[in-house]
Amino acid sequence: MNAVDIIIKKRDGVELTNDEIAFFIQGYTQGEIPDYQAAAWAMAILCKGMTDVETAALTRAMAQSGEMLSLEEVVNGIKVNQAVDKHSTGGVGDKTTLIVQPIVTSCGLAVAKMSGRGLGYSGGTIDKLESIPGMRLNLTKDEFLQQYLTYHTVLSGQSADLAPADGKMYALRDVTGTVPAMPLIASSIMSKKLAVGTHAILLDVKVGCGAFMENLEDATKLAKLMVAIGKNNGRFVKAELSDMNQPLGFAVGNILEVKEAVALLRGEPAAPDLREHCIESSAILLMMGQKADTKEQARIMVEDALNSGKAFESLKQLVSLQKGDISYLDNLEKFPKAPVIRVVSAPKTGWLSEINARIIGETSVDLGAGRIKKTDSIDHRVGIIVHHKVGDRITQGEPLFTIHAHSDDSCYNAEKKLSSAVQYSDTPCERLPQFYGLIE
């Protein structure tokens, strides 16, 4: 058995065996199979796909490439697994983890979350949280487990101990054009969940031009695939299908998104779509975690956590536990600002019929908020504020975008690119739906 034969077999659309998949993942994890062969294999998967059996085998192999955690606790002599998690398939302006995790932990649920970095135009939770000075997001397995068992809230990137194959493959996909491969998306997400040992998982599967799944049919297929993977491995999984044709919230970019999330948790005015998304997702998690019997009861609990400040205090606890400077959360003006900040005004009057999430996400990467190459560094200061939503009526000269850039040249290039992201209508147009359904 060798890597070249496995690549050729998948290139030709032949189903791989469990042993072949395990061999490839083990070899790549241990450095015996180089990046260029893994990149070729990933491209073959993108082009030829994988069966559900192959995807399940890939998920298990990636989860078993490192240590497997058990989050069970013994209560009155009975083993209890109470951890919940929410995971998004990636989108533009998606900072929901920064809001949902504090909400549900403040309502009594335990969250053990392993997150990733940005992939292409899709931002990453780890990149966002690294905007907070001192924040440690590279916890070891023992640190991750100890913080969870003691405080019932933890968030970390992939460590060398947990799902190391996914950590390597995740970074490789970003720079080889293989991010949209459905089997790689499903196995990446679910391998982390299997490795961490989370019992109840809510998946947020994005749909639209700013998502890896651009149409509802593909998104539904991905959602069902991941729910099935979870079920077959003893997990309780649901998947919500949510819109990503326009950015979620107003902010796109690492510091900008952290500030937007913190402001929402502090009870300040927030983008209605972001607030509703986080309330709905939190309510589903509270029901999955058996903290509420009905959606109405769960939403009341979520609103109370936000209005009382409990959710914000929960975020501060998480940041403090992981050595982040919470003074930045109390005073958002402490965050560094981009050297160039420029407002882009609407060129005409009308109703906004499109705010293309993909173009905005790609523009934020061009500004430096994301990576083009695997080794690229992130400029946490840069990004875009999108001042309006599809369906809004806007007047010529009114602010449309605010660009945060590191130079005049990059700001100018961003302004040119953003002009193609917006379409206008002379008559009122409908707002975009937030959710398209729930897969159970």
Image (cartoon, rainbow, N blue to C red):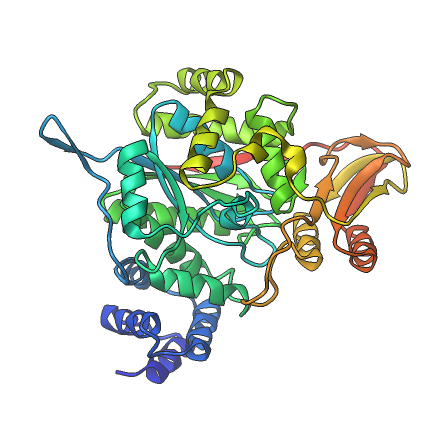
Position of residue 94 in the picture relative to residue 61 (left or right): right
Split into 4 quadrants, where in the image is the N terminus? bottom left
Q: Quadrant location of residue 109?
A: top left
Tell me, yes or no, if residue 236 can be seen here: no
User: 286 or 307: which is nearer to us?
Assistant: 307
Position of residue 302 in the picture relative to residue 403 (left or right): left
Q: Position of residue 198 (x, y in %)?
A: 29, 42
Identify the residue shown where x is 55% and y is 43%.
132
Identity of the residue furthest to the left in this view:
77
User: 185 or 196: which is nearer to us?
Assistant: 196
Residue 315 against residue 138 in the figure, above or below: above
Identify the residue shown where x is 78% and y is 42%.
401
Q: Quadrant location of residue 408?
A: bottom right
Split into 4 quadrants, where in the image is the C terminus? top left
User: 52 or 29: which is nearer to us?
Assistant: 29
Position of residue 67 in the picture relative to residue 193 (left or right): left
Tell me, yes or no, if residue 344 can be seen here: yes
Q: Position of residue 155 (x, y in %)?
A: 40, 43
Residue 17 against residue 300 in the figure, above or below: below
Position of residue 57 in the picture relative to residue 177 (left or right): left
Identify the residue shown where x is 43% and y is 69%.
45
Q: Position of residue 377 (x, y in %)?
A: 59, 61
Residue 365 against residue 30 in the figure, above or below: above
What is the number of callouts on the image? 0
User: 98 or 205: which is nearer to us?
Assistant: 98
Q: Position of residue 52 (x, y in %)?
A: 33, 59
